[in-house]
Amino acid sequence: MATLVEAPNGVKPKGKHYYSMWQTIFEIDTKETNEKVAIKKINNVFENRVDALRTLRELKLLRHVRHENVIALKDVMMPTQITSFKDVYLVYELMDTDLHQIIKSPQPLSNDHCKYFIFQVLPICSLL
């Protein structure tokens, strides 16, 4: 779980909180909605052109796709200073699990599991 920490430079901008998770600092907006969400931090997004384009593509697709089998993008957090903007924070609805956790699980996947996953993916492919 994330731990509330002091701002890295000692100066906390208005409307931001800082959390530490997996030895990474997250700069999070202080919107007090009490809604549990998932936050994806993309570090140094402009350092690699391919990664920047992938991030832009993800944003554009998720802004327009509304489907029960596609996780919803709820928000994109804006940086406090546009001149030092290097990380992107995407806010998603919180899910119980993800496909990676299911695949890595010690529980063997049955044919019914595989059919279910394919059934979930096929409608999404038709959207693209």
Image (spheres, grey):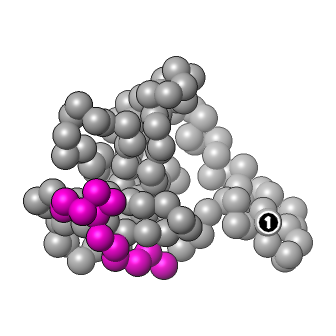
Judging by the rendered image, the residue that carries numbered circle 1 is: 104
Q: Is residue 34 magenta?
A: no
With 40 as the anchor, is 23 left or right in this view? right
Residue 55 appearing in the image:
yes
Q: Which of 10 and 62 is in front in this view?
A: 10
Q: Position of residue 110 (x, y in %)?
A: 87, 68
What residue range appears in magenta? 1-12
**Is any part of residue 57 visible from this angle?**
no
| Left or right, residue 108 beside residue 128 | right
| Above-or-below relation of 51 to 112 | above
Q: Where does the image place residue 112, in percent across and percent down from the top left?
A: 81, 65
Q: How crowded is mark 1: few (under 14 residues within 10 Å), some or many (20 or more)?
A: few
Left or right for 68, reference 126: left
Q: Which residue lies furthest to the front in this view?
A: 10
Q: Is residue 75 above or below residue 18?
A: above
> What residue is rendered at 38% in x and 30% in y?
60
Residue at horizontal 64 percent and vertical 41 percent from the top:
122
Q: In this view, does 35 lie above or below 38?
A: below
Which one is nearer the viewer's eye here, 61 or 116? Answer: 61
